[in-house]
Image (tube, helix red, strand yellow):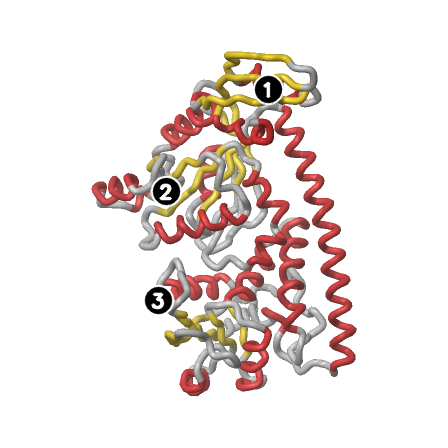
Amino acid sequence: MVNKKTESTVLPRERAFLVGVEIRQDDNLLGLDDSLQELGLLANTAGLEVVGQSTQRLNTPYPKTFIGPGKIEEIQVLASELFVDVLIFDEELSPRHLRELENIFEETIRIIDRTALILDIFAQHANTSEGALQVELAQYEYRLPRLTRAWTHLARQAGGGGGRAGGVGGVGLRGPGETQLEVDRRDVRKKISNLKNQLEKVRTHRQHYRTRRKRSRIPVIALVGYTNAGKSTLINQLAGSNVYVADQLFATLDPTTRRVELPGGQLALFTDTVGFIQKLPTSLVAAFRATLEEIAEADLLVHVVDITHPNAKAQAHAVHQTLVEIRADHIPMLVAMNKIDLLNDSIRARQTLDSFPNSVAISALTGEGMIDLLLAAKEFLFENLQQIVVRLPYEEGGLIALFHEQGQVERVEHGQKEVLIQGRIPGRLVASFQPYL
């Protein structure tokens, strides 16, 4: 008797062609080739097969089609020869650029941009209701100005798609007439308003949670870093947990918090957050505001840097830019130079460390350097005291008590409505007293 194995049907991956453009006056963190290589990794994460690419350097984008007519003809020939299903541009296309390119390539090839691709990846990887809400809001806000002939009545919802990026950006079918488009636009605006209301409730809930957490006096350490730098592996190593880890971009989106014991017995809460990337869509930053506030209200940041990456410095700069955007760049920061287990050149590792202040060399995979990292975190949180003078209203009794409990009080003067306190407090607490300095 012959045993027959049941084989699942595997759909062929759609064939993607990448288009990279370098605008000479733009101050991009990555060069054209490196940025296009990263776009290829994004496409692979979205379930696409990259079969080719083309680049162009311009002083300014072409008003109608972003790239020049000669480059379009070249891509048309290559796309036909390579049986391309989708063109992916390494920039965010304006509604006009998208519309004109769709007219040129008609319905034989779909056109998407970097923003739509990242939104699609987020939709695939959002595993919680909060994450799905945030991605859905970003998708709707991206699509609203692009509701033209490509409108498909939101067939592609956040969290759907099954790993194929064919529906990214909602392109593929000729849409209804102008009257129907207006109805569709009103429908999308209502959905956006509803999603914002739901996310505001999530934000309020998170704020209440953070307030309760602060009362516990347990400091919060937020892990930040470029996507795929190893943050989830690090939190697993520190807390002995099982946060999902994969060697791909944006493997995890939803924040995860774990309690970790520092040397000496003090406790800290480590929070793993969404990874950053260059050209992170502004709609995503806005939609993930409730999640990113976990970073902005942390006591200490641990910036995880992939020391083996050839563009480590550019990636670190992209992270810093995002921290500035979410107003978290004032928080004390440690730099965890990760993946030292992959380095054979110890001199190169030391030189890289010297270029990053407050850095510790670690391997999140093997556990090397974990004690050094925790000792450095302990020093920042509990031993690195800063001199401050504050005038605290008497109704801020919690802050007055916090200063006496966590700091070293040197002088106290009581007034009619407020108390002046001079002394030293842990650096992680300075932000709490910022309004009264």
**Residue labelled with disc 1:** 402
| Point 63% across, 57% down: residue | 135
Please indicate whether residue 410 sits to the left or right of residue 359 in the image. Answer: right
Q: Nearer the viewer, mark 2 or mark 3?
A: 3
- Dot 2 falls on a residue whose secondary structure is strand
Q: In the figure, 374 relative to 139: above or below?
A: above
Q: Which residue is mark 2?
A: 338
Return the x and y of residue 138 as percentages of the image width and height.
63, 59
Q: Which residue is mark 3?
A: 33
**Could you tell which of marks 2 and 1 lies nearer the N-terminus?**
2
Distance from label 3 to label 1 (Cα)?
52 Å
| Separation (CA) of disc 2 from disc 3 | 24 Å
Name the residue at 57% across, 25% down: 218
Mark 3 vs mark 1: which is more N-terminal? 3
Calculate the distance from the C-alpha at mark 2 to the C-alpha at mark 1: 35 Å
- Secondary structure of the residue carrying tag 1 is helix
Q: Quadrant of the C terminus?
A: top right
Mark sitting earlier along the chain (2/3) = 3
Circle 3: residue type:
Asp
Query: Residue drawn 67% across and 37% down?
Result: 207
Between circles 2 and 1, the one closer to the viewer is 1
